[in-house]
Amino acid sequence: MQDQDGERDRHGARNRGDASPGTPVGAPGGASAGTAAGFADRAAAETSAEAPATTAAGVPAGTPAEAPDAEPRRGRPRSAAAERAILDAVIALLEAGEPLAGLSIERIARTAGVGKATIYRRWSDKEELFVDVVRDMEPDDPPVSGTEGLADLRVMLESLRTRGLAQRSSALLHNIFAQMKSHPKLWNEYHGTVIAPRRLALLEAVRRAVAAGELRDDLDVELIDDLFVGPMLVRTVHRPDAPLPDDLADRIITALLQGLAPAARV
């Protein structure tokens, strides 16, 4: 979706491509960053970036005169610069105090210096665009092996902790989440495309841990998953003032593996 240099933008969050949560190690991800300034300059090059040069006859430059077996064009290539300008435009408007509900595609396009059609080629509606803005501001979903159980579970619990820290340290991100929850369509879009895949990845890690003999096999896997994830969600969501130490994921896993019953007295 965007360039692959992994540069961080001015919000401190690494920009992403389309890698899904729980992406196995080696899967593509990462993107280049831009700034909210210079939307028009970046977007002005979009036409040439998205449309190939043609000859006077309307044939793409460099195409042989007769190419009956040539693969047909499949529309314009996506412009990473245009996408970056659009995401930055939304963030700039939110930073200026605009509420999510008040942002229109027309206003976003004008701020980014692109046409509305450019936005609609990438996102079907505002909700889909806003979800990508939030994902752009959040820390990356970490790569996991996709084959291990407890090890992958620990990585994903740690990701929950770092996202909690990000929301605490970013007033803008915290404000966006608060607004999202008051807009059911937007929240449902975020839940379906971001939260649900993350939950599924955690559940699959629990299943792998059970299959590997790392966890009991006589309990419902969804209950086991809730026992691991629940404490982290309580700390990050329901108790915003609770500490989130670096070893919290390890402490949760250790407590559950050892159990909460007191040690047997000799």
Image (spheres, rainbow, N blue to C red):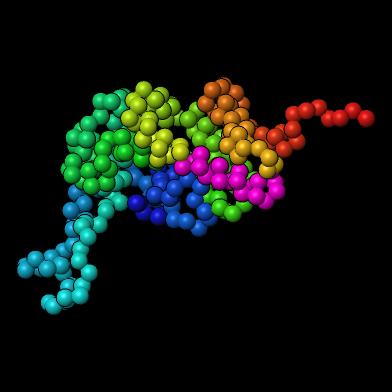
> Is residue 204 part of the magenta span, yes or no?
yes
Determine if residue 162 is in view: no
> Is residue 45 part of the magenta span, yes or no?
no
In the image, what residue occupies the spot 46% across and 37% down?
195
Determine if residue 203 is in view: yes
Q: Residue furthest front?
A: 218
In the image, what residue occupies the spot 25% across and 25% down?
102
In the image, what residue occupies the spot 22% across and 35% down?
105
Q: Residue furthest left?
A: 57
| Residue 55 in which image quadrant | bottom left
Q: Which residues are magenta?
A: 197-215
Image spot of residue 141 (x, y percent): 49, 44
| Residue 111 in which image quadrant | top left
Q: Quadrant of the C terminus?
A: top right
Image spot of residue 42 (x, y percent): 25, 48
Classify residue 65 as left or right of residue 181: left
In the image, what residue occupies the spot 60% across and 46% down?
207
Image spot of residue 177 (x, y percent): 41, 28
Please tell me whether residue 170 is drawn above or below residue 140 in the rendered image.
above
Classify residue 178 as left or right of residue 58: right
Magenta: main secondary structure: helix
